[in-house]
Amino acid sequence: MATAEERMRVLKMIEEGKISAKEGARLLGALGKSDEQARRQRGTAEAGAEGGGRWLRLRVSDTRSGKTRVNLTIPIGLVN
């Protein structure tokens, strides 16, 4: 998923002249597509969870920064 930091990095590269505005627009468009795909995948997983299936959810966070490093949800049927 594209973060605000990634978008700002692209905008900063445009500002500094490292890439053209056209290239920046293409990169931002690609980041937007990855956001859309991530939302679609989350929606699919949530819809499956509502169906009564069992899921294993694993989250790993950095204790210093509090940022999530791993966020994984898998069907319990895959866990052996």
Image (cartoon, grey):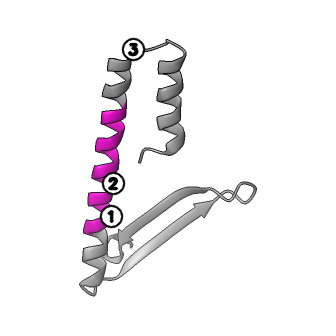
Task: From the image, tell me which residue sits under label 3.
Answer: 20
Task: From the image, tell me which residue sits under label 1.
Answer: 42
| CB-based contact (under 8 Å), mark 3 and mark 2 | no
- Looking at the image, which residue is at 48% across and 45% down? 3
Q: Residues within 10 Å of mark 1 (few under 14, many from 20)?
A: few
**Side of 16 where 19 appears, left or right:** left
The amino acid type of the residue labelled 1 equals Arg
Image location (x, y in percent) of residue 37: 28, 51
Of residue 57 and residue 47, the one placed in the foreground of this image is 47
**Side of 48 where 12 appears, left or right:** right
Q: Is residue 54 above or below residue 32?
A: below
Q: Quadrant of residue 44?
A: bottom left
Q: Residues within 10 Å of mark 3 (few under 14, many from 20)?
A: few
> Residues in magenta?
28-44
Task: From the image, tell me which residue sits under label 2.
Answer: 38
Q: Residues within 10 Å of mark 2 (few under 14, many from 20)?
A: some
**Side of 31 where 66 appears, left or right:** right
The amino acid type of the residue labelled 3 equals Ser
Q: Secondary structure at mark 1?
A: helix
